[in-house]
Amino acid sequence: MEFVTAVSGKEVLAVKRESKSSAFIGKLVTAAFLLLGFQMLTQSCGSRVEELTENSDTLKGAMIQELAETASRALYSTYMSGLAVSLEGDHETFWLLQEQIDSVLPFYGYLTEGLQGGAYGDGLWEILRAEADDEGSLSLNSIESGDGLGVELGHDLTDSSAESTLEELLRAENEAAMQMRQESAQGLFSDFVPHTRQIRVDLAALESYEALLKEFYTIDSNTMAGSDQLDVNKLTAKDMTIDKNSDGPQILIYHTHSQEGFVDSVPGDDSTNIQGVGERLAQILRDTYGYQVIHHTGEYDVEGRNDAYANALPAIEQILEENPSIQVVIDLHRDEMPEKTRLVMDLDGRPTARFMFFNGLSRTKTTGNIAYLYNENLDDNLAFSFQMQLKAAEYYPGLTRKIYLKGYRYNMHLASRYLLIELGAQNNTLEEAMNACNPLAHILDLVLSGE
């Protein structure tokens, strides 16, 4: 106490600064010794570590990569906490300091390369997790990019000032939907009648890449899509027709995420979740349009979603090998949205879930083209979803959301006519999802028959 009262405020501040500076230098020196020791230890088995880390597209390599990244973050956090906080906050100016540290301690730099989006930043482990998490991240990105999710409600759902009005509209919409269900049960509504063309989209106006993008697509923030892929003439030129009278099954429907349910789904009853909707779609395609359809109900996400795409791949490959007549593959999902967002519209007096077509591009801003997720059918996939979206816009305006583009592959390389569909969301009713199968089947038939 006597020492503190005997010096000025500036001297106290100088002492504190000197103390902090000494502590930082001490931590940095300690970190250097620890990291150099770690480097010497790993050099004794360096070739093995290098082999495992370089092979990050294997499960073992990905695990080694993840362990290395975890260790790197821990060391930064312990001995260079200020730098760690800056890195977490994406302050790019601090990467220069990290690079200097990595150059002094090269093995440490080798381990931290994955943190900078280097060669080991997109191994199989990360790909599986990113693909499996697609529905969980779509809703926020879609709203941020102006997907028009609030079209049927007449509001931008990101505007907090409209919250009370939005709640009133949702309440009125739910009451109207209940009334429609009651009237439908009393036989006041007729069966679904396929629409004739309601509007005609001006394709000449979509020859501009910017116009096409604005009207038809939502692109994930970490995904690249250029005019080489999104060209209206190229997308419409592809022949997507098939012969429905050919021998053998022509369409395969399955569910990578078979456990996705709706607000009134019954636990343990698959007929009330997305599998039940898939069977309804298959039934309409068979009975109304004359296609031969396989509805595969394999479950690949029961123990978790992380490996669902990897689990499904060999099974679907086997089905396609055993049934070479299959020309169309549909992976049917339901999306997940904020609770206040209702993907529903009144279609001819029927409460109907809105849906969205989804494409994986095997290319991200971070990695560029992902070579080991190459999709030889990418151009056909994009043409197929665009032609479906075009027919939906002309025959059922407002029923579909914009086509969503994301960076991975999602098993879409398995067929040229491959659709990944997000039908409704967790807060839709099963009836709303079932009702969407009628227009979806009609749109599919329009494209496959070339009408």
Image (cartoon, rainbow, N blue to C red):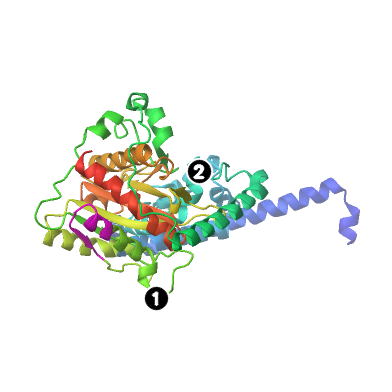
Looking at the rendering, the stretch of residues picked out in magenta corresponds to: 282-296
Residue count near mark 1 (Cα–Cα under 10 Å), binned few <14, some 14–19, many ≥20: few
Q: Is residue 285 magenta?
A: yes
Secondary structure under tag 2 reads helix
Question: With 21 as the anchor, is 337 left or right in this view?
Answer: left
Question: With 424 as the anchor, is 295 left or right in this view?
Answer: left
Front position in the image: 387 or 231: 387
Residue type, mark 1 in image: Gly
Location of residue 182 in the rendering, given as x and y in whole percent from the top left corner: 50, 62
Residue 91 versus residue 40 in the image, above or below: above
Residue for badge 2: 95
The answer to whether residue 424 shows anywhere in this view is yes
Quarter of the image with the C terminus in it: top left
- In the image as oriented, which residue stretches furthest toward the bottom? 268
The answer to whether residue 49 shows anywhere in this view is no
Q: Residue at x 64, y 51 (%)?
A: 168
Residue count near mark 2 (Cα–Cα under 10 Å), binned few <14, some 14–19, many ≥20: some
- Which of the labelled discs sits on residue 268, or is there none? 1
Residue 186 versus residue 398 in the image, above or below: below
Front position in the image: 48 or 143: 143
